[in-house]
Amino acid sequence: MKISMIQMSSQPDRAANLAQALRLMEKACSQGKPDLLVLPEHFDWTGGTPEDKRQAADLVPGGEAYELVRNFAKDACVAIHAGSLLERRPDDARIFNTTVVFDASGAEIGCYSKIHLFDITAPDGKRYAESATVAPGDGMLVYEIAGFRIGCAICYDLRFSRLFDQLASLDVDVVILPAAFTQQTGRDHWEVLCRARAIEFQCFFVACGQCGSYEAADGERRFMFGHSLVVDPWGRILAMAGDEICVLEAMLDKSLVKHVRGMIPMREHRRDIKDMPILMAEMGGR
């Protein structure tokens, strides 16, 4: 399967972001049609105030970002894993950080809303509070394209291995993670976490990021890490971008999944330790 990742630098400007996404998707298809296009997290809107984000959130289905990607998938006859967009639901005051997947006819395959929300204080003291505007999702999505079984995650989900353990139990061959990792955390954690997830769950790991910077609610610039990458089930990096807007391509060979799992049959060795007794030794011994 040929996969093309769209590394963007989204801003608090919907029209500019959608124009950038469209231009890069056209470029990806002109370079040699992929089986699957992947967009980054927040391809439709990044930054601004909580109220800006609520105003920018749109309907799924029917919103402007949703329709742009759906129509491109249909017109270009290409499947699209549409990163994530800000979703507004008529029956909920909160918004959601949602991936939508389309097949090559433009039909919606399914949606995944980010489960783990990014509420941290970065090493430089900057506070990130995703839950101030976004509600967590409560379900997973697994779908099939070109004979590959694909699981969904978004950005901060990367740090929570139980999610990927669940996806592995559903026999996924690939995990796709749209992201907008911060520059500070990305320098130390991005590559090692992506490679670790590929190795421990013996699947391809496709992580498509945002790069550049945007203006936050306090007027400060927030910098994103970029470095979109594809890791094979042995933990080898097949392709990696830098910190610029670009299209990144990779070929995924499903036979490698079978080969790696045959060498180290972790699925057969994995045990359910949830109900095992816990023995707590006293400090200092006897």
Image (cartoon, helix red, strand yellow):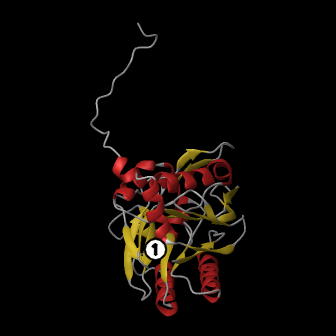
Report helix, strand or loop for mark 1.
Answer: loop
Question: Is residue 134 at least partly visible in the picture?
Answer: no
What amino acid does circle 1 point to? Answer: Asp
Read off the residue under disc 1.
58
Which percent across, then down, holds residue 69? 50, 82
**Mark 1 packing: few (<14 Cα in 10 Å), some, or many (20+)?**
many
Q: Does 276 sit left or right of 256 as displayed?
A: left
Q: Residue at x 66, y 42 (%)?
A: 123
Q: Position of residue 263 (x, y in %)?
A: 46, 55
- Seen as rendered, the residue at the extreme front is 263
Q: Quadrant of the C terminus?
A: top left
Relative to 219, does residue 84 appear above or below in the rendering? Answer: below
In which quadrant of the rendered view does residue 210 lie? bottom right
- Camera-nearest residue between 207 and 257: 257
Q: Is residue 8 above or below residue 24?
A: above
Counting labels gives 1
Q: Is residue 157 above or below residue 69?
A: above
Q: Residue at x 55, y 67 (%)?
A: 42
Check the image and name the residue furthest to the left: 275
Residue 181 x %, y %: 61, 57
The residue under the point 57% across, 71% down is 43
Q: Is residue 146 visible?
A: yes
Q: Quadrant of residue 206?
A: bottom right
View extreme (top): residue: 286
Q: Decide if residue 285 is on the left or right side of residue 188.
A: left
